[in-house]
Image: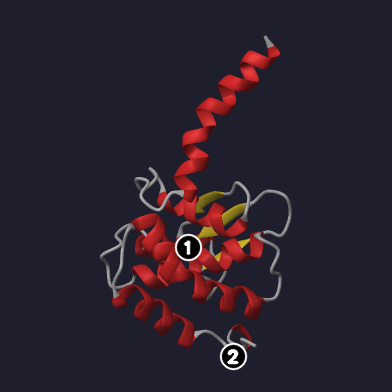
Amino acid sequence: MKTFITVLIALLLAPVASARLDPGAPVPRDARIAAAEFVAGHPVSITCEPLDRMPPAVLAFVFLDDSYVIHLGPYACEALKDPTSPIFGAGLLVLAHEAEHLAGLVNESAANCAAIRDVEFLAQRFWRVENQNVQGSAQRLYGMTPDNYRQCG
């Protein structure tokens, strides 16, 4: 019976695992989670926090513990709703930045530098979006971040 359950679980999870690796696979129901998990390398969850629960001037945050929750502020949550939006790339940068923290990059600059490189791939892979507006939107937000977030080496 134990072998049967293990095989059944493996068969049920196989489509999920292959969807991450197959470039032609359909976009998952929640591409935000799939993209964040791809970057983090493990399961994550995402919450959209109301503005009154966000620290001032913070777009998103994570706790560096074992909760693996990305707390997105309302701006990032809204930006990620529509991949054709002119602010989608900025939202994706925020998501990728926090996922990089959950992957183990504690330094803000290292997380941001990795995230800006992730944006175009994530947009194509998880949202099937290929246009310059995505990277341009991410670059504009990246350019507005404090200097200690932009020290790519």
The residue at the point 36 percent across, 61 percent down is 78
Q: Which mark is residue 15?
A: none
Query: Percent x, y for residue 57?
Result: 52, 76
| 103 relative position to 80: left or right | right
Query: Where is 58 relative to 63, above or below?
Result: below
Query: Where is 99 relative to 89, above or below?
Result: above
Query: Where is 30 relative to 60, above or below?
Result: above
| 123 relative position to 97: left or right | left
Q: Looking at the image, is mark 2 or mark 1 nearer the viewer?
A: 2
**Quadrant of the snapshot with the N terminus:** top right
- Secondary element type, mark 1: loop
The residue lying toward the viewer, choosing from 80 and 42, is 42
What residue sits right under mark 2 in the picture?
147
Amino acid type of disc 2? Asp
Of the image marks 2 and 1, the number of the one nearer the N terminus: 1
Q: Would you say the residues marked 2 and 1 are in contact, meaning their CB atoms lie under 8 Å apart?
A: no
Farthest residue in the right direction?
A: 65
- Secondary element type, mark 2: helix
Amino acid type of disc 1? Gly
Instruction: Report crowding for label 2: few under 14, some 14 to 19, many 20 or more residues within 10 A (C-alpha).
Output: few
Quarter of the image where one finds residue 112: bottom right
What residue sits right under mark 1 in the picture?
73
Query: Percent x, y for residue 134?
Result: 34, 73
The residue lying toward the viewer, choosing from 50 and 92, is 92
| 121 relative position to 36: left or right | left
CA–CA distance in space, label 2 to label 1: 22 Å
**Quadrant of the snapshot with the C terminus:** bottom right
- Report how many numbered discs are placed on residues in the image: 2
Query: Percent x, y for residue 129?
Result: 31, 63
Instruction: Report crowding for label 1: few under 14, some 14 to 19, many 20 or more residues within 10 A (C-alpha).
Output: many
